[in-house]
Image (cartoon, rainbow, N blue to C red):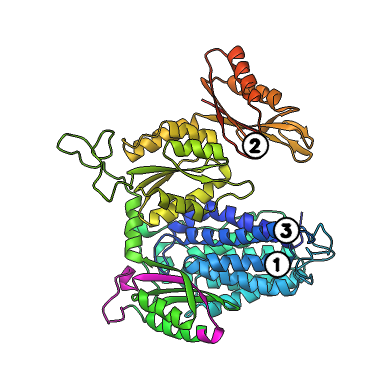
Amino acid sequence: MPHTLDADAVRSWCALALDALGRAREEIDAINVYPVADADTGTNLYLTVESAAQAVAAAFDGHAAAPGTALRPSLSEAVRAMAHGALIGARGNSGTILAQLLRGMADVLAEGDGTPDGDGGNGNAEGGAGDGERGGGADGLRRALRRAAELAYRGVAHPVEGTVLTVARAAADAAERAEDDQAAVARAAYEGARAALEATPAQLGALARAGVVDAGGYGLVVVLGALAQAVSGRAPAAGPVAARGGCPAAGPAHGTSTHGTSAHGTSTDGTPGDGPDGGPAFEVIYLLEAEETAVARLRERLDALGDSLVVVGGDGLWNVHVHVDDAGAAVEAGIEAGRPYRVRITHFGTAAARRAHADQPHPRPPADDAGRRPDAPGAPEPPAGRADRAPRAVVAVVPGEGLAALCAEVGATVVTARPGEPPAAGELAQAVRRARAPEVVLLPNDADLRHTAAAAAAQARAEGVRVAVIPTRSPVQGLAALAVHEPGRSFDEDVVAMTSAAGATRYAELAVAERQAWTMAGVCQAGDMLGLIDGDVAVIGDGLAGTAQTVLDRMLAAGGELVTLVLGADVPGDVAERLERHVREGHFAVDTVVYHGGQPGVPLIIGIE
């Protein structure tokens, strides 16, 4: 059913967009041929929206924790948080433009909210939308989409048609022709953007030659589809199409390299740049605190240094993106304009080589005179200065301190997931860096982290690390994978063995129902003990031990040789003793192992191998 565009809808929009970009990330990366064929547009858009979603979540958490305020932020606070989060987390050319699009929408929606900040939409403690449509209704959404397109065009130094800019303008045009209803406006914007996306190859030669649509435009269509779903309650019937006319999706692997047309295809000393097709060699991105007059001068200076210049933001905070041959000069220009920080400099050729290298099979290190490989057990210690760099590492996400200690004990780099605060892709990527290994196996141990883990792996691969994500859906699957991890064998063999062990482990968890709800096992009431097998509610019971016994019996009916019990925080030890006795007495030749995981909110996790 249709929903009012309020703070809750903004939060839903961010979550839906993040999930949809996670599913489309690899396809968007694969068709990324303009302005640089560096296969990262999907990843950059995902990371940008992830930052926006985290900022909105923080706004909700702040209201929930602050006494005497509404439980929810107002629409104005939510959209401003979204825009600010996207601005500070924007990655790449397309991510920077998306941040400007969201800022444009926020400018209009915040003005049309009509709700004082902190009032939650209706002035009571529960928050909500109040009477009527928030954000100026359908007309407000139309104006927001138009403002977004206008600001995006202004942010790009030399706008090119057939890109995300064209798609944004088409969305605004279609919205203006829609019926007087927010849901209809959002759907019309999506359909207009989708039609414009399909036409992009006819507007841009690089896309036509590759037989694909614009990658940034594809990402925007995905984001607008999420908006339409958030306000209409229905997912779009048809999604965007990556290839045009049945042509295969092309990417860097096809040899297509199409740097944006520019007068700045040479370096500052007059020699051709060593980026793609002789274009600028470096991508420079930084946040900048500066006055608007200083930013105007900065635009002129950076425009003379390189191309693909995008400067977005306002109110003293800006995100600067440019492709140049002289990265130092680009940063110095920012220092003259104000205070640059979070500076990221990427060499296109190096990044492409690293990404290609990370995707190729790695040969085993050669054996020494005694026939021993340096990564084999018993081999001599590495030379001084390299002893802290393991040949292969495992990064595991776990929900409790006990599990964290257990995984760390066997050598894994641990990321502890906090209740209601799943780790972001950047946090997982940082854990991969902390592991200090050329090869890393990433265990998300949660089905909801699959897209986050994939985006983190893409970041690490761009930095030259070979990463494999094993799609573990529960900590017990991660423990099974860790049990067979062997750094001495080849990377591919190790990943296959760990994946096989994880896949052979069925999992369940016990949780307390928070409210009445329909489940696969019937209707549960608040306070009931739920037994979830492979993610679905299979048992509704009264107590922890009794419900766990029923879950164990159902799972062991299909066979099993080893039961793993991971006890949550504050679960008494006699529960484990009772369950061990139940397994021993009722199931022949089945062993049980117990760990004190300490995970909050989930009193028991079960694994069957």
- Which of the pair 471/226 is nearer the observer? 471
Q: Amino acid at mark 2?
A: Val
Q: Which mark is residue 602?
A: 2
User: At numbered mark 1, what does the secondary structure look like: helix, strand or loop?
Assistant: helix
- Residue lying at the far left of the rendered structure: 369
Alpha carbons under labels 2 and 1: distance apart:
33 Å
Residue at x 26%, y 79% (from the top left corner): 271
Can you tell which quarter of the image residue 136 is in?
Answer: bottom right
Alpha carbons under labels 2 and 3: distance apart:
26 Å
Can you tell which quarter of the image residue 205 is in?
Answer: bottom left
Alpha carbons under labels 3 and 1: distance apart:
11 Å
Residue at x 34%, y 48% (from the top left corner): 438
- Are discs 2 and 3 less than 8 Å apart at CB? no
Of mark 2 and mark 3, the one earlier in the sequence is 3
Q: Amino acid at mark 1?
A: Glu
Q: Which residue is mark 1?
A: 77
Of mark 2 and mark 1, the one earlier in the sequence is 1
